[in-house]
Amino acid sequence: MKDHDSGKLRIGDNWNAIRIIALSQSNPLKAVAEFVENSIDARAKHITLVRGKEHGVHYLRIKDDGEGIRRNDRGLPDFEHVATHICDSIKKRLKAEGASGIQGEFGIGLLSFWTVGEELVITSAGADGRTYQMHMKKGDPGYRITQKRVLLPESGTELLIKNILPGIKQFSGEKIQWYLASELRDRIRNSGVEIRVLDRTARAEFKVEPRQFEGRLLHEISRLPQSDLYVEVYLARPDPTNAVGLYRRGTRVIESLSALPEFARPPWTSGYLQGILDAPHLSLTPGTRSGIIQDDAYQRLTEELGPIETELLRLIEEQRRAEEEQTSREVLRSVHKALREALLSLPAEEYDWFDLRQAGAKRSKTAAGTPAGGDGDSIELNDGVQGLTGEEPEPVQRDFFDYAGPLFSVRVSPASSVIPVGATKRLRAIARDRSNRLVERDLAFRWVIVEGEGALENADGEIVSFKAPSDPGLVRLGLTVKQAEIECSAEGLITVTDSLLPENQPRDATKQGIPSYTFQKAPGELWRSRYQPDQNVVVINNGHRDFVFASRNKALKVRYICRLFAKELVAKNFAGLPPADILERLIELSLYTEENLK
């Protein structure tokens, strides 16, 4: 053989080449979308897809009112050209001559019916007023053209696929609707075509509307300097199903841009983005139309997306920070509420840090003129309610939702307490409505000793005094509150003992309020949290392995932070106690706090 010998490639087996091309489309829905695109290219304004079953045969019919099959010199539908010019696209030549608004360029669209059904019938009218049909069968190299007997010829084209393949019979009309709404989103929107899907099997009808995205449209991206790229991206709540689709001239090529190796990275994999990226200059692989040729056009796309990716990463980081701040506020509200509710059930004289009980309010006075709790007990002011028989607050105009509804629940405050033998303890009944607002009107109280020894004073009042017996023991108090026909009950436990834990160390009288919290990333260090009294803030080590573990679940994270608050509260409130006593207090506070944690 000589070095200068050369030649041209040619197909050795034409029919085998046609078979390969016909079976190259692996997605039946993609094939249906191509048939619809042919109708749009033919300037159709109405397209109807009918899915049904006739004489035991499943079929799919696509009917449009477009320009129909191109006619030959005799004015008849040029079916011969369609069947004998595979891979020779008229549309490609039209685009080369300056035509716009058309999509096909390979001349193989009709062959994709092989992936949908066994037989294809195309119907179109001629200039002579007659209607003609072309019949093709899967696996058969032949075709035939017949005349269809109709009273009046109809404009447009009808494509009928019969003997739908078993694997796609489950494709419902709704599924076809959703696929076309995403696949041909911009083609439908730009052309104004109306597409309906009539599912006679399911007796349902659907209208194909261009897919609408969720989230905030990022106008900043569309203002970035770029060539002919069209970018419409929305910043949504994080979800693994969120994706930015890659389109070419309004037709989707790939459902998610992150499926391409070059873009399998943030921001495309972040789950924050929805939308489309239309690159009209891309080169697609024939047949499937879901593959991209790695040529200069693709390299150009990767370069043009560089500044867009940078801006998207910045916007996503801002969104993440805002979400973290919002989550922190929600967690802090949950922890504060749980601590307040817990301290209603615990002795007021033992838990006084953070000033949780009255936050700026003054202690009311008793009828005798002495401060409430002067005997060692304290009646807290919660939910804006005055204590005992103190001074009336100035009247304030309340909103409608500030007024309490009917009685729904009642609790004893404190629900658990420890007092020495012979001492006196005062307890309060807290009645609330279904929305957790304090109920004060038309209430009747009744206190009883259900179990144990002791005596009660003012047993029919909101606040009762319990006189401990001379012997240690466990006393169980019962409380019943009635409002008209509504009755609620609760219980309180009092431990009468010979000895008590040492009293708390003196505290600074400065009101601190409930602290907030902040994060400090210290991976590898063992401390979980620290309280900084000068700033009144709990610093949480978000690099600790326990925090990382708890962050996998929102509810678990809230419980973990709440336990850290309880730890700091006990450490501050009971400084100097033996470790065993501090652990007892930690269990006690955690129990009552987590009961109210939501």
Image: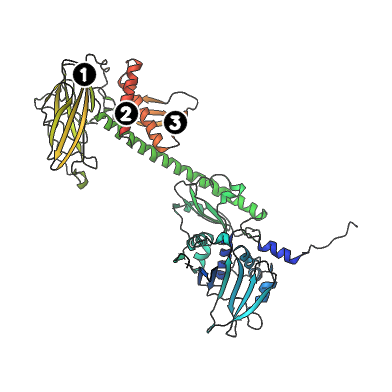
| Left or right: where 417 falls relative to 246 | left
Amino acid type, label 1: Gly
Residue 420 point in image, percent of width and height? 20, 16
> Contact, CB < 8 Å: mark 1 with mark 3?
no
Residue depth check, mark 1 versus mark 3: number of the one nearer the observer: 1
Disc 1 to disc 2, how far (Cα)?
Answer: 22 Å
Q: Which residue is denoted by mark 2 in the rendering?
A: 591
Residue 198 point in image, percent of width and height? 47, 68
Q: Which residue is denoted by mark 3 in the rendering?
A: 547
Disc 1 to disc 3, how far (Cα)?
Answer: 41 Å
In this view of the protein, can residue 427 be seen by the observer? yes
Amino acid type, label 3: Phe
Nearest the eye: 453 or 516: 453
The disc, 3 or 2, on the residue closer to the chain's N-terminal end is: 3
The residue sitting at 32% across, 35% down in the picture is 597
Give the image quarter of residue 287. Answer: bottom right
* Residue 361 vertical position relative to residue 396 in the rendered view, above or below: above
Q: Residues within 10 Å of mark 2 (few under 14, many from 20)?
A: few
Q: Secondary structure at mark 1?
A: strand
Amino acid type, label 2: Leu
* Residue 389 vertical position relative to residue 585 in the rendered view, above or below: below
Residue 290 point in image, percent of width and height? 61, 57
Residue 473, numbered label:
1
- Quarter of the rendering occupied by the C terminus: top left
Give the image quarter of residue 553. Answer: top left
Q: Secondary structure at mark 2?
A: helix
The disc, 1 or 2, on the residue closer to the chain's N-terminal end is: 1
Q: Secondary structure at mark 3?
A: helix
Residue 174 point in image, percent of width and height? 47, 61
Nearest the eye: 389 or 180: 180
| Left or right: where 325 falls relative to 443 | right
